[in-house]
Image (cartoon, rainbow, N blue to C red):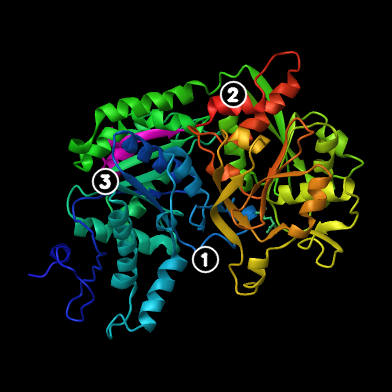
Amino acid sequence: MVDSRNLLEKVSDISTESEFFVPIPPGYKKGRTRYCFVMGTVMSGLGKGIFSSCLAKLMQDKGLTVAPIKLEGYLNIDSGTLNPFRHGEVFVLDDGMECDMDLGTYERILDQDLTRANFATSGQIFSSILHKERHGDYLGRDVQMIPHVTGEVKLKLRRLAAETDADIVFVEIGGTVGDLENAYYIEAMRELAYEEGPNSCCFMALTYILEPKILGEQKSKAAQLGIKQLMQCGVQPDIIACRAANPVSEKVRQKISVYSNVPFERIFDMPDSASIYMIPAMLRDAGLDFKVARLLNIEDRIDLRHERKAWARWCDFTDKIGSANHQVTIGITGKYTSVRDSYASIINALEHAGIALASETEIKWIETTTITDGNVAENLKDVDGIIVPGGFGTRGAEGKIACAKYARENNLPFLGLCFGFQMAVIEFARNVCGLTEANSTEIDPDCTGPVIDILPEQKKIEGLGGNMRLGGRDIELKARTLAWKLFGKKDSVRMRFRHRYEVDPRYIEVLEKAGLLFSGKAPNQPIMQILELPSHPFFIGTQAHPCLTSRPLNPQPMFVGLVAAAVQRHYPDEKLADPVQASRKVCG
Ligand code: GLN
């Protein structure tokens, strides 16, 4: 009898004869890869990405190859057009993919670069199906949600498995069980588990335990209903993680076990944690990693020696959390300051640098829309350094320029990122070179001093959409500069970009003559990528987004340099490591 589980053995493709539709990518080996599905019930914002990445990390520590993927319900093709106010920061991968900020969590926790294969949206799934339909690939079949749309999802997961040769693919489904837009993802998971057979998949549901103040006790009903909704989709969870403000009582966990058919020892609690970096230990202490390994029948692939080493390294890092002996305040000047998620990577990069240097790094949010030359000193008086972050458009730009001016004139440690780098160039051109009309054509398209202008290569494709310079690029470093020293005297480094505008090469000479040093540029192109002021204790900017590649176990040298310079400024009487010494000590 034909059975879709057998079809897997063959190169199954579309057939008008059969109801089964199991497209298999080349090189896929059935049984090689296991799948962990992470879903949320009751509400969104439970930290599915954090849970999934921390569990993936524990499996990676065991010497297993892990490949995460986030499945988004929305119809956008990528996250590039999403407003960071609504959706948090747009994270950019090395291959130029603009994706959800959860991918940043995976990269940081796993210390692993991801690609576009690790991110899918409904937009991508449907676009691919519609393309195939027009191409006649469905051979006269009516194209249906089941099996074709679900088939496309399964294809995406198996392709990731084949490309990465992963032991475990971690699949995080965006949104909450019960959302119309992710229902077909859950159906695809159910089908995949059926086709791959027993012990191939592990379904994990995150749920939330309410603790209304007025009752003073934990209530499990919402969680029960959420899990029930998942079971109505034909999915029996194997593991339930109970998110809650406090540790979840045994009674509540027993109740959830009874209602969900999930054995009590597989109901975990996951109370709020001060640092996400403590969560791997929380999951490990609860034995979640070995339970998953057992469920997936993958214990024989575990390398315990690898695990011992990886775990020791991780604990060296987490031991430093909360043991700071200095404290500094870094101002972040931007217009999205009311939504912290829009600066997630910067916050993380500062945290990594602070932990590595044993300096608690407080953030002061500075809304630049109201900053002027007149009030900037008042606003920056209690900070030890500033970051002028990336941004788009006019609002708040003059405030950022005022901040850069204040930092330059007052020896305040400064790090300019992308738009912040551009604002530093404008400030220097106006106030040091005397180009009073200096501006960016993004802010004033008709300005007579366009020191920042649209990239020539981007001009050609303007209007076609997707006209940003995106993804990882090499930066050539000039020898003996601050940047070169911070990065351990390397000739070149790689960082990630997301911009349309750049320094107009016609102004490079006048800027450099007046004392601005471009210490990093694109190889073979006059694109300026790092600037610094040799006369200043720490003034550096980059057209890139170095925050995107800062990792807890590998802090980013520019952030380490900034925090070190801020510590030096705050504690002038102590003989502390300078930014270069500090970065060399803690950066790989
Ligand atoms: N708006 C600027 C540009 O497009 C900076 C972009 C950014 O900060 N990401 O070049």
In front: mark 2 or mark 3? 2
**Which residue is pictured at 40% across the width and 78% down the height?**
131
Q: Secondary structure at mark 1?
A: loop
Give how far apart the Cα atoms at labels 3 and 1 are. 30 Å
Residue 76 disc label: 1
- Sequence-wise first label, 3 or 1: 1
The answer to whether any part of residue 263 appears in the image is: no
Where's the N terminus, which quadrant? bottom left
Residue 171 disc label: none
**Which residue is pictured at 74% across the width and 51% down the height?**
422
Horizontal and vertical percent position of residue 521: 64, 50
Amino acid bearing label 2:
Leu
Label 2 sits on residue: 357
Amino acid bearing label 3:
Asp
Which residues lie in the magenta part? 256-272
- Sequence-wise first label, 1 or 2: 1
Residue 167 disc label: 3
Mark 3 vs ligand 1: CB below 8 Å: no
Observer-nearest residue: 219 or 99? Answer: 99
Horizontal and vertical percent position of residue 112: 42, 43
- Residue 155 in the image: above or below residue 350: below
- Residue 236 in the image: above or below residue 564: below
Q: Horizontally, is 210 left or right of 13 in the view?
A: right
- Sequence-wise first label, 2 or 3: 3
369 inside magenta stretch? no
In front: mark 1 or mark 2? 2
Give how far apart the Cα atoms at labels 2 and 3 are. 36 Å
Ligand 1's image quarter is bottom right
Give how far apart the Cα atoms at labels 1 and 2 are. 40 Å
In front: mark 3 or mark 1? 3
